[in-house]
């Protein structure tokens, strides 16, 4: 006999015969309830009660718990062996994660040179850039300013990652890295490449290394250094100019009015209500975490994401490549916005237009997108997955070289990487194991699906692609219509002439 008990009631399962009316059913299980039976099998022990009490006290949502700002690449991303190198610096280490690696030592001497050069720099007074230098600041004063915020900076790291550094070693490392970044940005933005005294390939690799997740510096350091060297909000404007110089399509020029508008929008949106001598709490609230976060905010406008969509929906839109969409009557056009999230779909009577932001593809694209996606996967970042969603969307459009060629011919992709197939393979690799935000581009996906499910539009598009796929077929069709028109006119005139011949006009 099997026995089950619950709250003083015992259930027994007996094998035997069950009688229902006049019928007998052999070999059935009958459950008998025995009242008054006591059992202590579900009593809670003292340790379990203590554990339950601890659960009651843990009411914070995991995402709201305070985490270090300087994160390492999540394990899930590092497990893809072909991408591991994309998370590691090639020429320069920033911060403690990769500091001291032998292959990065040659750049350490340049950090010292650029730190000295930063204190002596007077080029900030170039009027055409509207940048003004403050009073001259000595190396001692700069270091003292950085050392004052070291307690705040250390809070941005997990204790295990900085346990091997004493306060002086940590302060010196952070100071040199901050000076190096600021002077490098300044030389790049002002076009003073020669003053870096580096090989051109090192300059290019540094740009790549500055946007690695594990190679970031707490922005508090850059903010203090910029407050010593620059007035107003010039430092942030310099950083944004540096970021845009790598992501603006050289064949796409904004109008003068739009450029002025963007300048003032960016300028006033980043004004600090308090001065640079604000409290530590205000610094944490106002400042971005690091350069990678600024890059992400300049590429993704999460306000453009819809509130529709969910993680589990039966009518989830299926992805289709660029050429498949083109054959369905959906054409492509480059947008004017620099935000990768600005993707629009416009439907017409028999066709449609998918507008995509133009993007440059080069050797640093894979590393940058992978690090941005890894940053979005960290526990202390906003749950928008904008970059991840963009990469997944573009991957759906590019299966083969012909898809890349279609987007490239429309001015959406500027390919500095190599063949069109390499670009398609790149996005296929980038999108591996990425889960996009279900709210991202959901309206665009729904409209694409509705267009694709409209049999009338698909039939018209296929007919046009079959019979009017080249200019010569169009000319041939027009010529055929012209010939048919002449024949109809000739027949009509001949009919009139015959009519009057048979029925002559009477006087």
Image: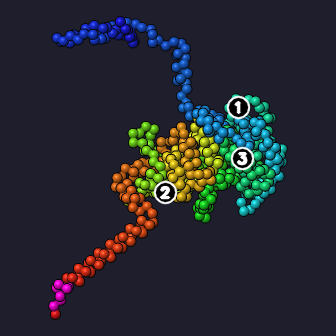
Q: Is residue 171 above or below residue 453?
A: above
Discs 1/2, front: 2
Mark closer to the chain start, 1 or 3:
1
Percent x, y for residue 313?
A: 41, 39
Percent x, y for residue 279?
A: 69, 41
Q: Is residue 434 above or below residue 44?
A: below
Q: What is the C-alpha distance between the residues marked 1 and 3?
A: 23 Å
Q: Secondary structure at mark 3?
A: helix
Colour scheme: rainbow
Does residue 107 appear to the left or right of 85 in the view shown? right
State yes or no: discs 1 and 2 in contact (Cβ < 8 Å). no
Q: Secondary structure at mark 1?
A: helix
Residues rendered magenta in the picture: 500-506
Percent x, y for residue 126?
A: 76, 60
Q: Is residue 502 magenta?
A: yes
State yes or no: discs 3 and 2 in contact (Cβ < 8 Å). no
Q: Residue at x 23, y 11 (%)?
A: 25
Q: What is the C-alpha distance between the residues marked 3 and 2?
A: 35 Å
* 21, 460: nearer the viewer: 460
Which residue is under mark 2?
A: 332
Which residue is under mark 1?
A: 161
Q: Secondary structure at mark 2?
A: strand
Task: Say which quadrant the C terminus sits in.
Answer: bottom left
Mark closer to the chain start, 1 or 2:
1
* 135, 428: nearer the viewer: 428
Labelled disc at residue 206:
3
């Amino acid at each position: 006999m099997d026995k089950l008990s619950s709250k003083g009631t015992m259930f027994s399962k007996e094998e035997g015969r069950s009688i229902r009316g006049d019928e007998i059913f052999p070999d059935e299980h009958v459950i008998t309830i025995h009242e008054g039976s006591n059992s202590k099998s579900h009593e809670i022990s003292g340790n379990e009660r203590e554990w339950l009490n601890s659960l009651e006290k843990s009411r914070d949502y995991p995402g709201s718990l305070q985490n270090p700002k300087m994160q390492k690449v999540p394990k899930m991303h590092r497990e893809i062996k072909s991408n591991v190198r994309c998370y590691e610096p090639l020429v320069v280490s920033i911060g403690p994660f990769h500091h001291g690696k032998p292959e990065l030592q040659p750049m350490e001497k340049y950090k010292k040179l650029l730190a000295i050069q930063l204190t002596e720099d007077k080029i900030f007074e170039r009027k055409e850039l509207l940048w003004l230098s403050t009073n001259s600041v000595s190396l001692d004063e700069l270091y003292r300013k950085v050392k004052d915020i070291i307690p705040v900076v250390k809070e941005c790291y997990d204790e295990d990652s900085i346990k091997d550094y004493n306060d002086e070693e940590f302060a010196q490392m952070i100071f040199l890295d901050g000076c190096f970044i600021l002077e490098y940005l300044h030389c790049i933005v002002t076009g003073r490449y020669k003053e870096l005294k580096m090989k051109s390939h090192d300059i290019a690799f540094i740009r790549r290394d500055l946007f690695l997740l594990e190679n970031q510096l707490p922005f508090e350091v850059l903010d203090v250094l910029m407050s010593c060297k620059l007035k107003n909000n010039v430092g942030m404007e310099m950083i944004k100019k540096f970021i845009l110089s790598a992501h603006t399509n050289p064949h796409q020029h904004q109008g003068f009015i739009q450029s002025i508008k963007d300048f003032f929008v960016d300028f006033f949106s980043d004004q600090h209500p308090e001065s640079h001598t604000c409290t530590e709490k205000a610094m944490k609230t106002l400042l971005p975490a690091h350069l990678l976060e600024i890059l992400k905010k300049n590429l993704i406008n999460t306000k453009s994401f819809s509130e529709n969509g969910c993680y589990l929906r039966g009518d989830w839109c299926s992805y289709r490549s660029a050429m498949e969409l083109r054959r369905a009557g959906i054409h492509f056009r480059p947008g004017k916005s620099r935000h990768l999230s600005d993707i629009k779909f416009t439907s017409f009577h028999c066709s449609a237009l998918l507008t995509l932001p133009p993007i440059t593809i080069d050797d640093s694209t894979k590393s940058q997108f992978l690090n941005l996606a890894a940053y979005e996967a960290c526990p202390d970042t906003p749950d928008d997955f904008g970059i991840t969603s963009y990469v997944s969307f573009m991957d759906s459009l590019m299966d083969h070289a012909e898809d890349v060629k279609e987007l490239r011919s429309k001015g959406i992709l500027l390919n500095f990487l190599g063949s069109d197939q390499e670009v398609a393979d790149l996005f296929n690799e980038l999108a591996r194991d990425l889960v996009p935000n279900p709210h991202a581009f959901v309206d665009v996906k729904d409209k694409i699906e509705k267009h694709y499910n409209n049999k009338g539009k698909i039939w018209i598009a296929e007919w046009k692609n079959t019979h009017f796929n080249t200019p010569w077929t169009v000319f041939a069709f027009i010529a055929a219509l012209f010939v048919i028109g002449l024949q109809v006119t000739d027949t009509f005139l001949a009919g009139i002439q015959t009519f009057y011949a048979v029925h002559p006009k009477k006087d």
